[in-house]
Image: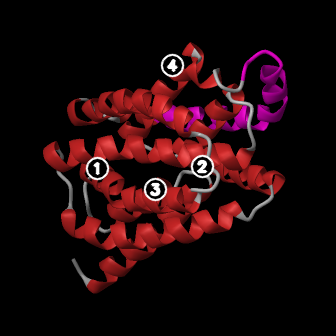
């Protein structure tokens, strides 16, 4: 690897970690960077997942105050994320990516639509659900399972999908749901990291560069997101999500 390639991967890792901490979708920065320096698609995808993992951890730390009182939610939903993460990892290790790749932009745009309607849905759900029980809803766990499969398989826009799912099912503030999203993202990616690290063609030199940069980006980006107003954060998430979906559609 040349010094120039190392710089490209370092910058991409930093930006990917920062974007993931705010809205998800940082893989759209880091994954193309890995392709640009010459790694094949599957190797780039798995390397990207491993490299951005520290960024998820860093951004979760930034949201530790918003996670207070959410232990039960996190534990129950994390179990579903582990199952989905395993399924998504097996899919990437054993099947072609072409079919799922075609569905990715539509899934992201659908998640954006759900997220835009989240305040109205939350008010409606709050009248029918007890706050201590909503995270045990079968519908929520099915949706989280599908999001986890997607997140382990490809991952771009995982944060947008998780925020949309959590926002529709759990009546709580956007900042607290964003903190919960970060924890679930860590769980999903941790499962994928173990699977790809053991069985996948991971480029460890690239990981070493991008992981440090991703951790710094995730920590700084998470701290910035915590200071945004709920309205502004919603605008940022929706704007980035729509942009991501349109870019992926244009590339098909």
Q: Which residues are magenta?
A: 102-130
Residue at point 36% right, 72% down?
212
In the image, which disc is placed on residue 56? 3
Q: Secondary structure at mark 2?
A: helix
Is residue 240 visible to us here?
yes
Query: In terms of sequence position, does the residue under pointer 4 or pointer 1 come before the other?
Result: 1
The total number of labels drawn is: 4
Q: Nearer the viewer, residue 118 or 79?
A: 79
The outermost residue toward the bottom is 3
Q: Position of residue 251 (x, y in %)?
A: 51, 47
Q: Position of residue 118 (x, y in %)?
A: 77, 33
Whether residue 115 is in magenta: the answer is: yes
Tell me the residue that label 4 is attached to: 142
Q: Secondary structure at mark 4?
A: helix
Tell me the residue that label 1 is attached to: 46
Tell me the residue that label 2 is attached to: 179
The reply, left or right, for residue 169 in relation to residue 156 is right
Task: Indicate how the structure is coloured in the image.
Answer: secondary structure
Looking at the image, do the residues carrying marks 2 and 1 touch, with CB atoms under 8 Å apart?
no
Residue 224 position (above or below residue 195): below
Looking at the image, do the residues carrying marks 3 and 4 touch, with CB atoms under 8 Å apart?
no
Residue at point 25% right, 54% down?
40
């Amino acid at each position: 690897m040349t010094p120039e390639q190392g710089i490209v991967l370092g910058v991409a890792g930093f930006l990917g970690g920062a974007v993931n901490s705010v809205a998800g979708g940082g893989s759209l920065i880091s994954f193309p960077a890995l392709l640009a320096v010459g790694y094949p698609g599957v190797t780039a995808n798995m390397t990207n997942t491993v490299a951005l993992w520290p960024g998820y951890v860093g951004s979760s730390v930034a949201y530790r105050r918003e996670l207070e009182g959410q232990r039960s939610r996190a534990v129950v939903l994390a179990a579903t994320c582990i199952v989905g993460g395993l399924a998504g990892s097996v899919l990437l290790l054993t099947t072609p990516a072409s079919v799922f790749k075609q569905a990715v932009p539509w899934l992201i745009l659908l998640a954006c639509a759900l997220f835009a309607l989240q305040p109205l849905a939350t008010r409606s759900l709050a009248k029918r659900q007890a706050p201590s029980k909503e995270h045990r809803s079968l519908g929520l766990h099915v949706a989280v399972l599908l999001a986890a499969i997607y997140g382990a398989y490809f991952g771009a826009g995982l944060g947008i999908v998780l925020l949309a799912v959590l926002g529709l099912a759990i009546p709580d503030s956007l900042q607290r749901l964003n903190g919960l999203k970060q924890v679930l993202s860590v769980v999903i990616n941790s499962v994928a990291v173990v699977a790809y690290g053991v069985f996948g063609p991971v480029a460890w030199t690239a990981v070493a560069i991008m992981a440090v940069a991703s951790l710094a980006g995730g920590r700084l980006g998470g701290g910035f997101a915590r200071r945004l107003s709920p309205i502004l954060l919603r605008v940022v998430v929706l704007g980035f999500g729509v942009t991501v979906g349109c870019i992926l559609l244009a590339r098909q």
